[in-house]
Amino acid sequence: MISEKMLALARGNSAIRAMFEEGNRLAALHGRENVYDFSLGNPNFPAPAAVGRAIRGVLDREDSLLVHGYMNNAGYADVRGAVADSLNARFGTAFDADNIIMSVGAAGGLNVVLKTLLNPGDEVIAFAPYFVEYGNYVANYDGKLVVVPPNTEDFMPDPQRLETALSPRTKAVILNSPNNPTGVVYTAETIARIAEVLEAGRRAYGTEIFILSDEPYRELAYDGVEVPYVTKFYNNTIICYSWSKSLSLPGERIGYIVIPRAVHEYEIVYEAACIATRVLGFVNAPSLMQRVAAECLGARTDVEAYDRNRRLLYEGLRALGFSCVFPQGAFYLWMKSPVPDVDFAEAAKRYNILVVPGASFGCPGYVRLAYCVSEDTIRRSLPAFEKLAAACFARA
Amino acid sequence: MISEKMLALARGNSAIRAMFEEGNRLAALHGRENVYDFSLGNPNFPAPAAVGRAIRGVLDREDSLLVHGYMNNAGYADVRGAVADSLNARFGTAFDADNIIMSVGAAGGLNVVLKTLLNPGDEVIAFAPYFVEYGNYVANYDGKLVVVPPNTEDFMPDPQRLETALSPRTKAVILNSPNNPTGVVYTAETIARIAEVLEAGRRAYGTEIFILSDEPYRELAYDGVEVPYVTKFYNNTIICYSWSKSLSLPGERIGYIVIPRAVHEYEIVYEAACIATRVLGFVNAPSLMQRVAAECLGARTDVEAYDRNRRLLYEGLRALGFSCVFPQGAFYLWMKSPVPDVDFAEAAKRYNILVVPGASFGCPGYVRLAYCVSEDTIRRSLPAFEKLAAACFARA
């Protein structure tokens, strides 16, 4: 009766819902504070004070018809200009307002770009492990997600395996650094090699291949590691950014798309992306939050606190014998599962620990722990992990 | 290279852009205040003071992690509950939080519902004249828009012509009252007759047919006219509402979907619509604005001022010999064009008047004038219309 595609998704959704309900059941039984929920990528630090000040300031100073009204589908020109200036200052790029489209978060941005680019049957490549929604986004436009198997050595995307995955139907490759779920930050060398492979692919097939760089975690990088700006490595690069994590505003749905002039047929791609913003029903990114974001381009969430969480959880789990990727960015810890990952996630629940099995990211054998929780939760979870370790390593 | 669908849309977009640029050209030549721009459905009255108060109040009282954070894809349960209560109080319905999904405006809501319902080739019926984006929204999900020819007598949708348009592939019928572009408010009798036709169609074909009621103009009704609540007439009714016009918040992208329990397989439709909200990249309606909307359920824009505009423009144009539908709702005047509508819109520009040809709504021979402008603009436009009338009636 309803859409077959949606019916399949609704059926597949029961696992996610079951996990959510399990969390609630455990919280009801043992108290919310005694459930160690590492399953959700929801920032636990409030938005910086600059956000509240900016909201009040915009309301005080600016005309209601401007603040809450329609503007171009691309967003306010002055906001887009401010975003471009900020990127130029930080990354030495040369963008202007007409390289930026304000978007309903990175998820909205990715949908706009995929709608703009894909014809039915076009292939989009992602490196496992990958954010599971990529598959749904690509399917929305009748594209096909092609998954490059994981490089379990260091979880850096492997340019050689990318070469094997390329085909005449390859329209785009999704990069995601800092990475969800591994916390890996792609090196400049890796990005440069990926660019070479794609240039060779373009020449070989006589097609255009785009990089879609999904960057909601750009500002969450630790130990001074550089997160290279991908447009500098490959002309056909489109960036999808979000302030969801960097300003702890995930509910507000505010981000932007960068379409550089170096992109093949830039004018038509940019215009089509503006129209896609309209026809998909976004119409424009939320207006007040556009103006607020422009005033908070220098504000940051509490990266140091995430860093403390990162070290505490990583070191705590290592000491218990678990093997983890040391994350350089985002707020996820990627851990080797001593038993099959789905079994591990099940076993963890018995100790009130919630984690996401790697199978949900196209990479069984691992689990993801989101450490955007309180330091106290991590600290108190470690004895529970100790019991879990004893149970698992005994079995393994 | 890019999506063929989007390439076609980008090419078709040049007419709209040309109109917009013509407006700017005229404004540069003659001054913005001397251009009588009736082309845009952008509210000209600021948001009620209650909106600013609610934003500040929510920021003062509520936790930042709640206000700006993720929640269920359907939206905050308390906000959905408040919306349901408000509808029940006004319309005698019996909704609760689980009948409501908060949406990114009505445009976002319509996309979510069409994504939920449509299989490729499914037909969606609209009555001409209709909001041109319906065609794009339906095409997003590979559906086919079937247009019922206009009833030029009174522009009330004609149930008999609807009967002719039904087929075994009919999945939905879009209603839009108060109507864009005609200003007509559908009568209870008309809606009841449409419901009968659809019930007969369901029985005849053994299919489910839905009404999608697109209601961004619900609160803009004049002369005490009733805008019937469509769920009371037909079980398979889904409502898409927006606060864009009722609270002058078009840029904020905030509205809701109503899925009554009487809808066939309600549970699966509701769950699929929540998932569609996620996979289309909306994820959730903007969070702060959800909380604000819940506090402003009793607030209204300045309907009396729109009413004054309505009378002034209608009477002014009638006195000049133009023939118009007397609008009962929305903020549009639908006028018979004394010459072909595209020529009329062209001729109007010579007098610094911007209107939209009826061809853009699937109904040539008419033009739409949006009277969400200042009273002063209307007053000063009338001498320009007088010259335009003289030129057109002389030719006609």
Image (cartoon, coloured by chain):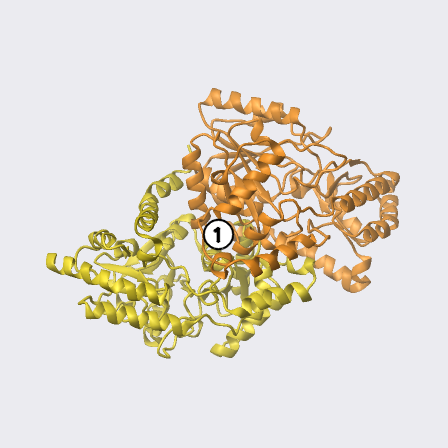
Chain colours: A orange, B yellow
Residue drawn at the location 43% of the way across and 51% of the way down: B119
**Residue B294 position in % (x across, y down):** 57, 68
Q: Nearer the viewer, residue B388 or A68?
A: B388
The quarter of the rendered structure image containing the N terminus of chain B is: top left
Residue drawn at the location 83% of the way across and 43% of the way down: A312
**Residue A383 position in % (x across, y down):** 88, 49
Q: Nearer the viewer, residue A394 or B3?
A: B3
**What secondary structure is marked by label 1?**
loop
The amino acid beneath tag 1 is: Phe
Q: Is residue B70 left or right of residue B128?
A: right
Q: Is residue A79 left or right of residue A325?
A: left
**Residue B172 position in % (x across, y down):** 39, 60
Q: Quadrant of residue A288?
A: bottom right
Q: Is residue A310 left or right of residue B382?
A: right
Q: Nearer the viewer, residue A229 or A79?
A: A79
Residue drawn at the location 15% of the way across and 58% of the way down: B392
In this figure, which residue is indicated by the disc labeled 1? A282
Q: Chain of mark 1?
A: A
Q: Quadrant of residue B336?
A: bottom left
